[in-house]
Image: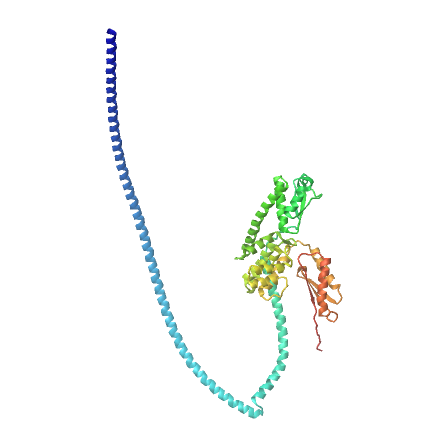
């Protein structure tokens, strides 16, 4: 029984403990809630105070910014008003000046009217005097006809016949004298202009070889270039279209090809392959493709630069690309693009000196050898090809004519065409422009004249235009017109067979009849 009672007391104590614990915990929980509530209210109050402070600061800043903007606006307004006042003053001054001018013009107009009236009076008086003089002359003419026994018409005819015989001799003497003086003056003036023009041209010509030589780091690279059983060299020649010559030349190989652009692309491809070290057909094709893309940009850039240097605007894009291709073309070692720019400058100087159109001369000078950029791809001379390209690009007719006449293929019909001829000859013949030695040049001219004089009936022959033309004078009694045409064809064929020369040589046979008498 006592055990049961103890257990019951223990249970009651446990229940009471649990209840007291729960009550204490509830009190603590309510106190925490109340404390959290008070803290939240305090935070809210502080946040409201801070928001109000920030709002006041924002309002103050906004007012300050508004004040500054207002000051700036007022300052700008004052400046604008000042400018308007200044403009009004200027307009007022201009109006005053215009009013003074108008008054001056009115006064001059009144003076002119007065002078016109005075002149009309004088003209009227002159008309009256002219009528009196005419009547007097008529009376004198009748008196003279009566005294001489011939009419006025007969006297005039006799006088004119006598004057005609007398003046014919005087006219011939005067014409001869003035013709000689004019020739001397023209020669002297032409020499002065040419010397002045050549003196102002001091450009350097880029001399390039028609066969490209590529240096090698060592002779061992020749075997790598050839490849196993020659596959690398075959691939290189197939991709580039250029012959790769590997001979006994130490540490060098030679690239040979007719197309200068292909040769340059092949040279750059080989140099990059040597620098890279990997030489096989796939790599050759890859490098060559990259080089071609870069050269397209280089060609376009070179054409634009040359047009800019020559001062020739608004060129057709196709003509710019053709100009750029001439960067890789040479004639006797003279770079054709640099030569064309120089001809443009010389033509412009000559045109300015002589009062011709400098724009036409400059444009034709730059484009005169445009056909050389593709003459190895098409049939015909570079002049014919160039004229075709210019007409396709709708170039001006006066420019096309100057280009067509610069080697004498057609007769020049304008001053600008003649100036382009002169500028082309000056650029090509000045010292240092072309690499051909004097001995070779003289020897070629002698061979040309020797071939021409070897034909029967030839009286004299002259190699002119730096060996680009040979003129043959025949005896008219031994060679007729048909024979002259046949002789020109035969001489041109003989030159083709026996001489080596760049470009083309024009053969002209001259046959004329002269009558000479001596006055004793």
Q: Quadrant of residue 176?
A: bottom right
- Total of numbered circles in the picture? 0
Residue 118's image quarter?
A: bottom left
The colour mode here is: rainbow
Furthest residue toward top: 2
Q: Quadrant of residue 315?
A: bottom right
- Looking at the image, is 257 positioned above or below residue 513? above
Residue 171 position, x and y percent, is 62, 77
Measuring from the top left, give residue 76's x and y in whole percent.
32, 51
Residue 57 visible to an observer of this rendering: yes
For this rendering, which residue is in front, 211 or 96? Answer: 211
Q: Is residue 158 above or below residue 397?
A: below
Q: Answer left or right for 290 relative to 84.
A: right
Please say if 124 is above or below 29: below
- Percent position (x, y) of residue 251? 68, 42
Q: Residue at x 31, y 55 (%)?
A: 81
Nearest the viewer among 22 and 493 is 22
Quarter of the picture holding the N terminus: top left
- Quarter of the picture containing the C terminus is bottom right
Q: Is residue 446 visible?
A: no
**Foreground of the two, 4 or 202:** 4
| Residue 520 falls left or right of residue 354 | right
Q: Nearer the viewer, residue 86 or 235?
A: 235
């Amino acid at each position: 029984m006592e055990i049961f009672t103890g257990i019951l007391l223990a249970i009651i104590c446990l229940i009471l403990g649990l209840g007291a614990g729960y009550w204490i915990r509830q009190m603590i929980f309510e106190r925490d809630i109340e404390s959290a509530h008070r803290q939240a209210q305090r935070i809210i109050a502080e946040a409201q105070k801070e928001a109000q402070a920030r709002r006041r600061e924002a309002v103050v800043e906004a007012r300050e910014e508004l004040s500054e903007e207002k000051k700036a606006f007022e300052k700008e307004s004052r400046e604008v008003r000042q400018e308007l006042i200044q403009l009004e003053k200027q307009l007022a001054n201009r109006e005053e000046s215009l009013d003074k001018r108008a008054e001056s013009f009115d006064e001059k107009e009144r003076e002119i009217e007065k002078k016109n009236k005075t002149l009309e009076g004088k003209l009227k008086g002159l008309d009256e005097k002219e009528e009196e003089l005419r009547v007097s002359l008529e009376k004198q003419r009748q008196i003279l006809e009566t005294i001489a026994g011939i009419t006025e018409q007969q006297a005039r005819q006799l006088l004119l016949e006598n004057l005609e015989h007398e003046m014919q001799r005087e006219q011939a003497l005067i014409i001869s004298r003035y013709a000689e003086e004019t020739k001397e003056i023209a020669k002297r003036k032409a020499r002065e202009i040419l010397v002045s023009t050549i003196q102002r041209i001091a450009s350097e010509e880029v001399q390039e070889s028609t066969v490209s030589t590529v240096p090698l780091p060592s002779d061992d690279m020749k075997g790598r270039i050839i490849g196993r059983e020659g596959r690398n060299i075959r691939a290189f020649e197939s991709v580039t279209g250029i012959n790769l010559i590997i001979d006994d030349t130490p540490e060098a190989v030679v690239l040979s090809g007719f197309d200068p652009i292909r040769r340059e692309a092949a040279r750059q491809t080989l140099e990059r392959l040597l620098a890279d070290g990997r030489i096989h057909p796939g790599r050759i094709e890859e490098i060559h493709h990259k080089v071609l893309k870069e050269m397209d940009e280089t060609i376009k850039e070179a054409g634009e630069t040359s047009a800019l240097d020559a001062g020739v605007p608004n060129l057709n894009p196709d003509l710019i690309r053709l100009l750029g291709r001439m960067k890789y073309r040479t004639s006797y070692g003279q770079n054709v693009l640099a030569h064309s720019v120089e001809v443009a400058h010389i033509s412009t100087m000559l045109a300015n000196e002589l009062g011709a159109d400098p724009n036409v001369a400059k444009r034709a000078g730059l484009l005169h050898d445009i056909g050389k950029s593709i003459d190895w791809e098409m049939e015909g001379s570079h002049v014919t090809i160039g004229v075709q390209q210019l007409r396709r690009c709708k170039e001006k007719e006066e420019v096309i004519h100057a280009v067509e006449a610069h080697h004498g293929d057609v007769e020049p019909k304008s001053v600008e065409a003649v100036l382009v001829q002169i500028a082309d000859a000056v650029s090509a013949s000045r010292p240092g422009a072309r690499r051909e030695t004097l001995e070779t040049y003289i020897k070629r001219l002698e061979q040309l004249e020797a071939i021409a004089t070897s034909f029967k009936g030839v009286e004299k022959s002259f190699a002119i235009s730096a060996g680009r033309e040979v003129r043959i004078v025949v005896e008219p009694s031994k060679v007729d017109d048909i024979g002259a045409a046949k002789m020109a064809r035969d001489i041109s064929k003989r030159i083709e067979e026996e001489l080596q020369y760049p470009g083309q040589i024009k053969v002209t046979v001259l046959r004329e009849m002269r009558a000479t008498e001596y006055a004793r």
